[in-house]
Image: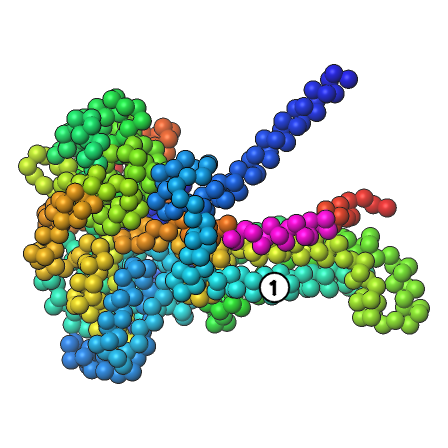
């Protein structure tokens, strides 16, 4: 009964039934996508397009309007409250329609059904292309939000600029880092690994010293695998236009990752526990999972989920492939988008600007989200934070460094949510010893490609 | 004699294992609903540990997020009363009608009902969603209640039960005495059908109480969630940056959720047993 795929992300989630739900409903939802990019043109511009840009948005925010926003991030309600205080005529109806894939299933269903979709929705970066390429998201550059580009780093902006359209504004990001339990590392005299070669050596040393100890846990997580390939310089997915997709999980980055990770799996050097499970929290609390390579959103989750680990944990840069050449990637994080079907495009765009490029960004950062805005990441007050949980270490300095080292040019598949849901059947097999990691990746590529073809994409599967 | 004894020892052993298998999760649930979020992950899972906070957990469950749990409980009760109650009423009327009256097309209805028993509700969820969406009924309680009203299995059970439990001679006698069909049904047949009806009621209550997938895709507003979907929401909220981990509330909430269904079982189980045996012997 392995539920394998914590399907990634800062909001990682989904499993069990929700995976099935995603599979089913996406099959339905994407049918709509394949049958026509035609529907995309219908909305895009929106009824108020005549008065677009900053002036149009400012005017729209003074009109009595009700916006519906689907989001699960807990601080969203504070942002909504601050927004309604500043723009009392606009009422924002905040609905938590589920976390991550639960929400996408509903969003897909509502878009396909043509009714019931919100004006705005929180969508993780890996799922954005899927909604963007079916024409479900409004192009915000038409509303003049393109000028906000300078507020964000290039890698983050890449994630919301899809096929030449600005389909969302970044909310939080997850540049990767190594979170490690210093008490355990000290006890076994392990050096904090600066490179992946050292990481592998540490994994061996730790497990040999105490068979109950592992350097990390992994049962196969598609979000982790794609982020690792990303950091290794891989570009397994590319999309051009709205129909042409190519997949190559044998590119140099993917091979680098597989060569590193295979021996760790086959040597049983990773605790076979899925992230976010109760055993995982137990392992983090009792020190049997000594480190995590994950996104910069992890600190608040450690503080609330593993309160007993206080003062044990530290943050180090993500290990490097080549010593002295920092290269990282994003893991998780989400944007917020205006739906193409929204009748309040300009007011929605105005809210979005407030939320992710205005006062809302600071509210998010204060709640523990890792910010997307350069100004906040580089601010003295942010960098100087020294949480007691991490023994007073100024962790944001490490995380900000990671944010500036994210490899550019990454893209996800326009059906990544589905691809991630079938990950356990292919790559996941490698973790139970039924196949090699490399063979698993090839199989994943094949299954993803054939799904893409069924959905009407022209897929080039390289090998 | 020796052989016989060993045989029953084996059976007893098997039964004990089965009993443990069934009771252990429940035991775990009870034990862990007494723990704080912190001691959940630091104490042994199958025994009490850390401060005993069952009452404070229950209080938190009922008040967390403005008492949304109570709202979910109310929603679930609504879906159970309207959905399971309605399904039982419809199944009883239809099953009785099919068993006791002759009319053209009866065999066709029989075939359709039998086929419907074989289709899992989950497979119909997405088409049902699209259908309800066209009717603009998604995200309303109707979207959960209306599909719950149909219980082919319940109909089939009542049908089979009515064939044996309500003798045709009795109905003839009632007619000769001048009772109308409705009066006969309510005054005579319904009482004879009692155990069958309760069985169907129990089946549909359990099905509606545990219904997860249908409300999950039909509803997007937490205000209308039943307990199953709501608890899952609590469970996954910690997967988010800044999301508060409230596993202690998820566990205590689950405990509170299974209690009513256990009570329903204890009250109705004897009918269930006699109902299940109905129609198993041809007299």
The residue lying toward the viewer, choosing from A358 and A384, is: A384
Q: Magenta residues, as a range?
A: B256-272
Residue at x 10% of width, y 52% of height: A383
- Residue A150 falls inside the magenta stretch: no
**Nearer to us in this view, A297 or B99:** A297
Q: Position of residue B266 (x, y in %)?
A: 66, 49
Pick the residue in front: B132 or A308: A308
Q: x, y percentage for residue A356? A: 20, 64
The residue positioned farthest toward the front in the image shown: B51
Q: Is residue B61 visible?
A: no
Horizontal placement of B169 versus A406: left or right? right
- Colour convention: rainbow
Task: Reply above or below: A92 against A285.
Answer: below
- Seen at 60% across and 50% down, the residue is B262
Task: Name the image quarter holding the N terminus of chain B.
Answer: top right
Chain letter behind tag 1 = B
**x then y, percent, for residue B77:** 56, 62
Q: Characterize the local packing of mark 1: few (<14), some (14-19) or many (20 or more) Cα atoms within 10 angstroms.
A: some
B270 in magenta: yes
Q: Secondary structure at mark 1?
A: helix
For the point 80% across and 60% down, the residue is B191
Q: Is residue B153 left or right of residue A152?
A: right
Please name the residue that numbered disc 1 is placed on: B81
**Where does residue A345 sit, x and y in percent of width and height?**
26, 74
Taking the image as drawn, is residue A285 in sight? yes
> Is most of the magenta stretch helix, strand or loop?
helix
Picture layout, residue B11 above or below residue B199 = above
Residue B103 image-quadrant placement: bottom right
Q: Quadrant of residue A462?
A: top left
């Amino acid at each position: 009964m392995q539920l394998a795929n914590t399907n990634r992300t800062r909001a990682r989630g989904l499993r069990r039934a929700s995976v099935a739900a995603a599979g089913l409903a996406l099959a339905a939802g994407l049918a709509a996508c394949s049958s026509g990019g035609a529907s995309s043109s219908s909305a895009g511009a929106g009824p108020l397009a005549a008065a677009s840009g900053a002036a149009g948005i400012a005017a729209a925010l003074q009109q009595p309007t009700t916006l519906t926003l689907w989001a699960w991030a807990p601080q969203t309600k504070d942002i909504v409250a601050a927004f309604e205080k500043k723009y009392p005529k606009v009422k924002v109806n905040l609905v938590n329609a589920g976390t991550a894939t639960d929400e996408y299933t509903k969003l897909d269903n509502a878009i396909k059904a043509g009714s019931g979709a919100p004006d705005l929705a929180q969508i993780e970066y890996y799922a954005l292309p899927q909604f963007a390429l079916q024409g479900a998201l409004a192009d915000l550059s038409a509303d003049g939000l393109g000028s906000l580009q300078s507020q964000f780093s290039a890698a983050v902006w890449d994630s919301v600029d899809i096929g030449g359209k600005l389909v969302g504004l970044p909310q939080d990001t997850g540049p990767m880092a190594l979170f490690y339990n210093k008490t355990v590392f000290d006890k076994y005299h392990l050096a904090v690994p600066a490179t992946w070669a050292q990481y592998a050596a540490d994994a061996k040393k730790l497990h040999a010293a105490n068979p109950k100890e592992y350097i990390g846990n992994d049962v196969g997580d598609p979000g982790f695998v794609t982020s690792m390939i990303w950091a290794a310089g891989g570009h397994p997915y590319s999309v051009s236009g709205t129909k042409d997709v190519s997949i190559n999980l044998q590119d140099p980055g993917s091979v680098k990752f597989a060569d590193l990770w295979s021996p760790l799996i086959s040597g049983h050097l990773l605790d076979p526990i899925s992230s976010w499970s109760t055993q995982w929290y137990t392992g983090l609390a009792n020190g049997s999972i000594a480190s995590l390579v994950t996104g910069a959103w992890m600190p608040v989750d450690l503080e609330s989920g593993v309160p007993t680990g206080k003062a044990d944990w530290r943050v180090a840069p993500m290990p490097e492939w080549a010593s002295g050449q920092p290269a990282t990637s994003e893991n998780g994080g989400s944007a917020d988008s205006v739906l193409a079907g929204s009748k309040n495009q300009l007011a929605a765009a105005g809210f979005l600007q407030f939320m992710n490029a205005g006062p809302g960004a600071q509210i998010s950062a204060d709640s523990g989200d890792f910010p997307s805005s350069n100004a906040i990441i580089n601010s003295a007050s942010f960098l100087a934070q020294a949480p007691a949980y991490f023994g007073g270490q100024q962790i944001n300095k490490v995380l900000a460094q990671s944010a500036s080292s994210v490899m550019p040019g990454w893209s996800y598949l326009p059906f990544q949510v589905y691809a991630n849901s079938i990950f356990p059947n292919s790559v996941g097999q490698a973790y139970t010893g039924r196949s090699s990691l490399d063979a698993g990746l090839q199989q994943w590529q094949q299954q993803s490609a054939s799904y893409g073809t069924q959905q009407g994409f022209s897929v080039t599967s390289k090998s | 004699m020796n052989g016989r004894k060993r045989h029953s020892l084996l059976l007893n052993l098997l039964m004990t294992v089965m009993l443990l298998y069934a009771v252990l999760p429940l035991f775990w649930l009870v034990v862990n609903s007494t723990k704080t979020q912190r001691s959940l992950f630091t104490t042994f899972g199958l025994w009490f540990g850390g401060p005993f906070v069952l009452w404070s957990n229950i209080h938190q469950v009922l008040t967390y997020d403005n008492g949304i749990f109570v709202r979910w409980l109310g929603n679930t009760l609504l879906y159970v009363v309207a959905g399971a109650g309605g399904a039982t009423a419809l199944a009883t009327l239809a099953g009785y009608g099919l068993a006791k009256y002759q009319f053209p097309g009866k065999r066709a209805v029989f075939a359709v009902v039998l086929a419907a028993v074989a289709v899992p509700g989950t497979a119909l969820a997405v088409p049902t969603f699209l259908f309800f969406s066209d009717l603009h009924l998604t995200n309303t309680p109707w979207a959960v209640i209306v599909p719950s009203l149909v219980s082919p299995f319940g109909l089939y059970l009542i049908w089979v039960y009515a064939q044996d439990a309500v003798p045709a001679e009795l109905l003839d006698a009632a007619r000769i005495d001048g009772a109308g069909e409705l009066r006969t049904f309510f005054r005579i047949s319904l009482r004879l059908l009692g155990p069958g009806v309760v069985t169907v009621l129990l089946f549909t209550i359990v099905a509606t109480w545990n219904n997860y997938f249908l409300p999950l895709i039909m509803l997007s507003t937490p205000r209308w969630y039943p307990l199953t979907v709501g608890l899952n929401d609590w469970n996954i909220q910690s997967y988010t940056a800044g999301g508060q981990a409230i596993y202690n509330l998820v566990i205590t909430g689950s405990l509170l959720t299974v209690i009513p269904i256990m009570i329903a079982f204890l009250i109705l189980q004897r009918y269930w047993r006699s109902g299940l045996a109905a129609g198993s012997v041809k007299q």
